[in-house]
């Protein structure tokens, strides 16, 4: 019996207890409070996984809820903890809890160390392996230099285009090449639809 007094609380349960205690403040999320609240959110999650990300949509959805998105910083090793955390989320009248950063159709550009990448800069081809259910993506990028490591910027951009979970689970290999001509290439905005179709046909070669 005494041993049970010192039993450690489940970290996921502890995280959601903290969230419920601060839910109203997070929902209102005034500028003067936001930094401390987001730091508290991060601290509460550290015992679950130190490499989780959190974002709160400022705009409310049709149900007048805000979206709290829990991400994995693009690392598939963190995906199971994101899923466990979201599955354990309590019912909330103020928040919709979303696993992983979702696709975004906005025309967003990513700039890293002077290298800028936007939707008009990227084209692709692909190979779908029906037998092994593998998807090989080849990106052709304007201003791409093989002697400079642009991988972080490109992967951050891809996460916006197709979503974090898809990027981490459905692409077997990604190859970067310098763009020379649009001939025979697909524009990057078509990639989400291509992946959806490939998934529907269980990697049937298109």
Image (cartoon, rainbow, N blue to C red):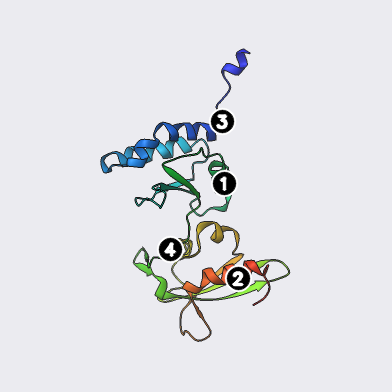
Q: Disc 3 designates what residue? A: 10
Estimate the spatial distance between the alpha carbons at disc 3 and disc 2, rounded to whole Å: 40 Å
- For label 4, count other residues whose C-alpha is less than 10 Å away and answer few (under 14), some (14-19) or many (20+): some
**Residue 118 spot, x, y in % from top left:** 39, 70
State the mark number for residue 197. 2
Q: Looking at the picture, does residue 133 appear above or below residue 58?
A: below
**Residue 95 spot, x, y in % from top left:** 43, 44
Label 4 or label 3, whichever comes before in sequence order: 3
Label 1 or label 4, whichever comes before in sequence order: 1
Estimate the spatial distance between the alpha carbons at disc 3 and disc 1, rounded to whole Å: 16 Å
Q: Depth-wise, is mark 4 or mark 3 nearer the camera?
A: 3
* Along the viewing direction, whichever of 202 and 43 lies nearer the viewer: 202
Q: Disc 4 designates what residue? A: 153
* Along the viewing direction, whichever of 122 and 18 lies nearer the viewer: 18
Label 2 or label 4, whichever comes before in sequence order: 4
Quadrant of the rendered structure where residue 106 is?
A: bottom left
State the mark number for residue 83. 1
| Callout 1 secondary element | helix
Q: Residue at x 55, y 27 (%)?
A: 9
Estimate the spatial distance between the alpha carbons at disc 1 and disc 2, rounded to whole Å: 25 Å
Q: Depth-wise, is mark 1 or mark 2 nearer the camera?
A: 2
């Amino acid at each position: 019996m005494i041993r049970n007094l010192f039993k450690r609380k489940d970290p996921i349960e502890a995280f959601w207890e903290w969230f419920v205690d601060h839910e109203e403040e997070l929902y209102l999320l005034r500028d003067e409070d936001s930094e401390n609240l987001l730091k508290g959110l991060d601290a509460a999650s550290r015992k679950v996984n130190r490499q989780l990300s959190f974002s709160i949509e400022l705009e409310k959805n049709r149900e007048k809820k805000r979206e709290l998105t829990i991400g994995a910083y693009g690392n598939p090793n963190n995906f199971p903890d994101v899923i466990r955390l979201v599955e354990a989320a309590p019912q909330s009248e103020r928040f919709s809890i979303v696993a992983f950063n979702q696709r975004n159709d906005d025309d967003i550009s990513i700039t890293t160390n002077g290298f800028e990448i936007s939707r008009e800069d990227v084209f692709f081809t692909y190979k779908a392996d029906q037998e092994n259910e593998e998807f090989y993506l080849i990106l052709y990028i304007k201003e791409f230099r093989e002697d400079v490591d642009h991988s972080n910027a490109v992967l951050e951009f891809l996460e916006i285009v197709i979503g974090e979970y898809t990027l981490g689970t459905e692409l077997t290999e990604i190859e970067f090449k310098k763009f020379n001509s649009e001939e025979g290439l697909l524009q990057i905005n078509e990639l989400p639809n291509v992946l959806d179709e490939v998934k529907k046909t269980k990697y049937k070669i298109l």
